[in-house]
Image (cartoon, rainbow, N blue to C red):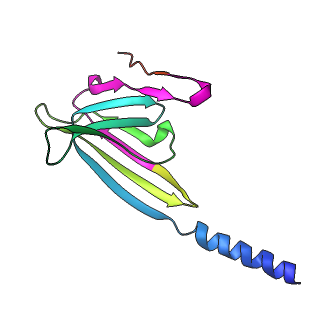
């Protein structure tokens, strides 16, 4: 009987933790360059606030290519930007949606990738 109670208690605890999904939205603005590494993995070069330098940002989360949309709707002379929605559940962050707003598809550059002992390389964008 004690084992049954422990199993039920464990199940209810797992259910309570699993149903506690935290949804966050974010936006990366003033994007200067976009790098496509592989699949749905991108990074974005943006100006570092308060300096003349730049740094790279990326959107955290496990994803599939279906989660990413590239939208060529940014007028010439304006900065590109990224909108994303993440869900945090069961200890992992999942990308629900990412919209990359660009001038044209030519704004996307190939980026490097590294899978450790399984290989590394550079993604080439085909135009």
Q: Is residue 120 left or right of residue 75?
A: right
How far across and down, in percent of the image, does residue 123 sit? 43, 22
Toward which corner of the image does residue 11 lie, by quadrant? bottom right
In this rendering, is residue 18 above or below 80?
A: below
Q: Quadrant of the N terminus?
A: bottom right
**Residue at 65% from the left image edge and 71% from the top image edge:** 15
Residue sitting nearer the eye, 45 or 63 = 45
How far across and down, in percent of the image, does residue 60 sit? 43, 48
Q: Is residue 18 left or right of residue 26?
A: right
In this rendering, is residue 20 above or below 45?
A: below
**Residue at 27% from the left image edge and 22% from the top image edge:** 106
Residue sitting nearer the eye, 72 or 31 = 31
In this rendering, is residue 83 above or below 17?
A: above
How many numbered marks, from 0 up? 0
| Furthest residue in direction top, as rendered | 127
| Furthest residue in direction left, as rendered | 77
Q: Is residue 71 left or right of residue 76?
A: right
| Furthest residue in direction bottom, as rendered | 1
How far across and down, in percent of the image, does residue 32 sit? 21, 34
| 119 drawn magenta | yes
Write the start and end of the magenta stretch as one range. 96-120
Q: Quadrant of the C terminus?
A: top left
Toward which corner of the image does residue 124 lie, by quadrant? top left
**Residue at 53% from the left image edge and 69% from the top image edge:** 20
In this rendering, is residue 120 above or below 64?
A: above
How far across and down, in percent of the image, does residue 23 sit? 43, 62
**Residue at 51% from the left image edge and 65% from the top image edge:** 21
| 117 drawn magenta | yes
């Amino acid at each position: 009987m004690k084992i049954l109670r422990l199993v039920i208690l464990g199940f209810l605890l797992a259910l309570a933790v699993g149903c506690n999904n935290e949804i966050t939205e974010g936006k990366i603005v003033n994007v200067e360059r976009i790098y496509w590494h592989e699949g749905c993995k991108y990074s974005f070069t943006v100006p570092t606030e308060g300096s003349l330098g730049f740094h790279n940002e990326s959107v955290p989360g496990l994803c599939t290519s279906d989660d990413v949309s590239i939208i060529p709707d940014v007028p010439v002379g304006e900065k590109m930007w990224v909108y994303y929605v993440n869900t945090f559940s069961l200890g992992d962050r999942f990308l629900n949606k990412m919209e990359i707003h660009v001038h044209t598809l030519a704004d996307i550059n190939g980026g490097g990738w590294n899978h450790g002992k399984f290989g590394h390389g550079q993604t080439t964008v085909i135009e």
